[in-house]
Image: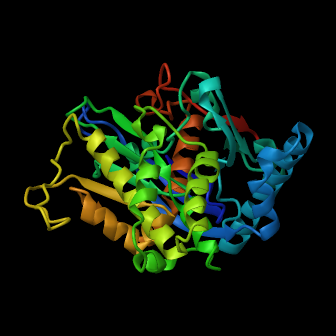
């Protein structure tokens, strides 16, 4: 059976709403021992930038009263439903969409107290579109003691089995590893560090929406004192499973950078330093994930020849998310990592998460596990998501 689904993703960088109309079909295997996989086609995609008012309202949601927050939850759900109808109209998808899967916009995330919250009322989306909806994808895992994040590894495992390592450079960077062989097929993953949310905020101090291709960062220098401060933050030494709330970037990381800028650090130097911080933390994360042995080894680097691989074959790392367009950041990753860094076609770079949300929703609809406890630390794998019947 082919499932025809729209996946919605709103990242913590607040750049806009990603929509992907995808067709998904489970692949048959002649080998009963082989893990199942899914085929996919990204048929239509779009990113609708948030108007400044919505960007401001989403950014300020955690400061609202309980009543104001719930009203925003419903209003944002209706906004999502309206954008879906716009997307259907613009792409001629009338009567083709069987399911909408909405990640929502994460606001509060406190898994230690078994709570996570995403704005965007699924009932409102279903009411506006008259299409069935799956939402609240993280809640069950958190209720089972998990981090609720990262949530995408189930899709990486089922849709992209040719890769062993994955890096998503969104508002928050997260890394995952398919441990086929070395760890009995378990998927391991965790949030690495804030990424685009911090980079974009720093670029705004120079009047730019973002640092295109990392050109401003490339012209700056690394402030070793600030880099040491950032790398010493306790989160980085904590073992996985672990996940980050948006506030770690805005309330912990950015104040350190701003303090350095207040004493003379330029925007270019701040961006350059933070790019190096991301690259160093990703390097550490990949080394940790492969410490028990990846299917392909990490390449060795000769002194003075950063990025030079003298051992092979290498493990392959698929890089997606908005940060994959930052050429300078990708270059720093290639220089530091002993793996083959692969940036795929633009559609997969930009819409991998929306694609995976669609698959997670299909698995929920089929009542199959769609969150991996090996990633989140929950007591078991789970079937996450609330279902809202929009059809009459």
The image shows residue 234 at horizontal and vertical percentages of 47, 38
Q: Residue at x 60, y 37 (%)?
A: 365
* Residue 390 visible here: no
Vertical arrangement, residue 135 with respect to residue 146, above or below: below
Vertical arrangement, residue 192 with respect to residue 222, above or below: above
Considering every residue shown, the one lying at the far top of the view is: 379
The image shows residue 384 at horizontal and vertical percentages of 59, 32
Q: Residue at x 81, y 57 (%)?
A: 57
Q: Left or right? Give the position of 344 relative to 287.
A: right
Q: Quadrant of the C terminus?
A: top right
- Viewer-proximal residue among 332 and 294: 332
* Residue 314 visible here: yes
Q: Residue at x 32, y 47 (%)?
A: 284
Image quadrant where residue 254 sits: bottom right
Q: Residue at x 21, y 42 (%)?
A: 294
The image shows residue 349 at horizontal and vertical percentages of 45, 65
């Amino acid at each position: 059976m082919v499932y025809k689904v729209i996946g919605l993703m709103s990242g913590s960088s607040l750049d806009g709403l990603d929509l992907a109309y995808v067709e998904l079909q489970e692949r048959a295997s002649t080998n009963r021992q082989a893990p199942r996989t899914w085929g996919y086609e990204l048929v239509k995609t779009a990113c609708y930038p948030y108007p400044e008012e919505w960007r401001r309202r989403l950014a300020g949601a955690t400061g609202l009263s309980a009543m104001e927050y719930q009203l925003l939850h419903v209003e944002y759900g209706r906004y999502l439903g309206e954008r879906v109808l716009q997307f259907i109209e613009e792409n001629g998808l009338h009567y083709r969409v069987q399911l909408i899967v909405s990640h929502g916009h994460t606001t509060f995330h406190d898994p230690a107290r078994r709570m996570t919250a995403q704005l965007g009322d699924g009932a409102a989306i279903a009411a506006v579109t008259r299409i069935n909806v799956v939402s609240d994808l993280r809640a069950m895992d958190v209720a089972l003691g998990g981090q609720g994040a990262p949530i995408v590894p189930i899709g990486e495992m089922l849709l992209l089995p040719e890769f062993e390592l994955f890096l998503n450079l969104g508002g928050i960077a997260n890394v995952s590893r398919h441990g086929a062989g070395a760890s009995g097929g378990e998927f391991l993953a965790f949030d690495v560090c804030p990424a685009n949310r911090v980079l974009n905020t720093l670029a705004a101090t120079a009047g730019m929406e973002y640092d295109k291709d990392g050109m401003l960062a490339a012209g700056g220098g690394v402030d070793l004192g600030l880099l040491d401060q950032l790398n010493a933050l306790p989160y980085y030494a904590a073992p996985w499973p672990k996940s980050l709330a948006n506030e770690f970037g805005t309330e912990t990381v950015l104040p350190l950078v701003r303090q350095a800028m207040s004493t003379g650090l330029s925007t270019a130097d701040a961006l350059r330093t933070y790019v190096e911080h991301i690259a160093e933390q990703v390097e550490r994360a990949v080394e940790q994930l492969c410490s028990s042995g990846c299917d392909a080894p990490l390449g060795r680097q000769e002194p003075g020849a950063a990025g030079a691989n003298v051992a092979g074959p290498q493990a392959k790392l698929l890089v997606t998310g908005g940060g994959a367009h930052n050429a300078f950041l990708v270059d720093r990753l290639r220089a530091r990592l002993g793996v083959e860094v692969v940036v795929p076609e633009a559609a997969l770079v930009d819409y991998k998460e929306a694609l995976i949300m669609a698959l997670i929703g299909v698995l929920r609809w089929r009542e199959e596990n769609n969150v991996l406890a090996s990633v989140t630390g929950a007591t078991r794998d789970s079937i996450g998501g609330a279902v809202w019947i929009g059809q009459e």
